Amino acid sequence: MKRQKLLPFLLLIQIILIPFLGYFPNEVERFYSNGCYPFISKSLRMVFGNIPFSVGDVFYFLFIVFGIQWVWTNRKSWKTHWKYNMLKIVSCFSLIYFAFHLLWGFNYYRQPLFEKMKIERDYTDADLLVFTKKLIAKTNAVQYQLTQNKNKKIVLPYSQEQVFKMNVNGFSNLAKEYSAFYYTDLSAKKSLFSLPLTYMGFGGYLNPFTNEAQVNSLLPMYHSPTTSCHEMVHQMGYASESECNFIGFMASVKNKDLYFKFSGYSFALRYCLANWQMRNKAVYKQLLQTVHSGILKNYKESDDFWKAYETPIETGFHLFYDTFLKWNQQKDGMEGYSKFVNLMVNYYKNKPL
């Protein structure tokens, strides 16, 4: 019985001790994120990257199937051996919790990108207005270059697999300025769980156990470059959603392909406009009038897509993920996705878009 209690005890130790890493971000950055993690990530991507389907999704499916089978097989013993069964479950969770942190999760405790890149955290309405106008001009220009028509929405001419491969170009160009963002050993997949992901309201995720970037294949395709870049940044060891949005945006707009640039610019613009919608609706309406109607048609395409899959399930999963992020040092929770506006506004104050 003592052996059976070892793993549950170690789970308790992990839950108590791991949060203390938040007090040592520089050490986590040095010894894990820039130390052993790159080797772990590269190894997993080399093993699973060339397999044409999501190995991680298969693992999850088998885990669920065997889990259900185990519960059913042991259903008659729950009354008499419930302690033993609970210890089995907690032991399993202890191993998963350990593997999650060892293979990826410690990145939640690394040094914030604000500090590493020396970017200010706060900005004024005036700063946001200047940046939003620059972003509108840039997005309009790229949209018109692609369509020669202000009223025509963008239709991406590439497959999902082509997008994954072409993303590497954006990261390579970005790495010329910041070597930390260099990306190799592509391992991005269309998720086998794209439909459930859609109902949950997610565009993708990183499987921390196989280091595969999973992308929801049902999304409107103009989203694909920036969404997949976001997940690839998670692979590089960045856990913060705002940081992944920021780096993913930069990788998209650094890409030589105009469709990828549009994906990045339109993605960032939508967040800035949403910011204005909350801050000042009059300014929001004025700004919206300057955006090409073709871009607004792309936004409507996205809105219609998500509305078609709206259910209470989405709210439940967002609440769960919000709690998960806050537990893992991400104080803003789901709001962290939009916090990358802070990074963009301050980073591009004295830089061209």
Image (spheres, helix red, strand yellow):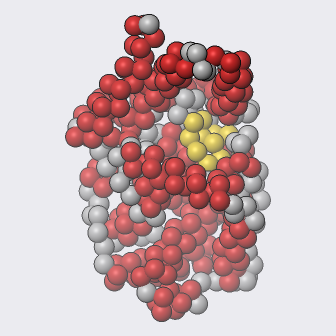
Which residue appears at 65% of the width and 47% of the height?
Answer: 215
Tell me if residue 161 can be seen: yes
Quadrant hosting residue 297: bottom right
Looking at the rendered image, the quarter that the N terminus falls into is top left
Q: Is residue 47 left or right of residue 30?
A: right
Q: Between 35 and 303, which is closer to the camera in this rendering?
A: 303
| Above or below, 148 relative to 281 | above
Q: How many marks are shown on the rendered structure?
A: 0
Q: Between 322 and 49, which is closer to the camera in this rendering?
A: 322
Q: Between 77 and 93, which is closer to the camera in this rendering?
A: 77
Quadrant hosting residue 106: top left
Which residue appears at 54% of the width and 90% of the height?
Answer: 285
Which residue appears at 56% of the width and 66% of the height?
Answer: 267
Tell me if residue 225 can be seen: no
From the top left corner, tell me how far across and down residue 51 is, in percent.
71, 28
Q: Between 193 and 222, which is closer to the camera in this rendering?
A: 193
From the top left corner, tell me how far across and down residue 182 is, in percent.
46, 42
From the top left corner, tell me how far across and down residue 274 is, in percent.
51, 75
Which residue appears at 70% of the width and 75% of the height?
Answer: 300
Q: Is residue 146 left or right of residue 106?
A: right
Q: Is residue 95 left or right of residue 24?
A: right
From the top left corner, tell me how far across and down residue 279 is, in percent.
41, 82
Q: Is residue 319 left or right of residue 148?
A: left
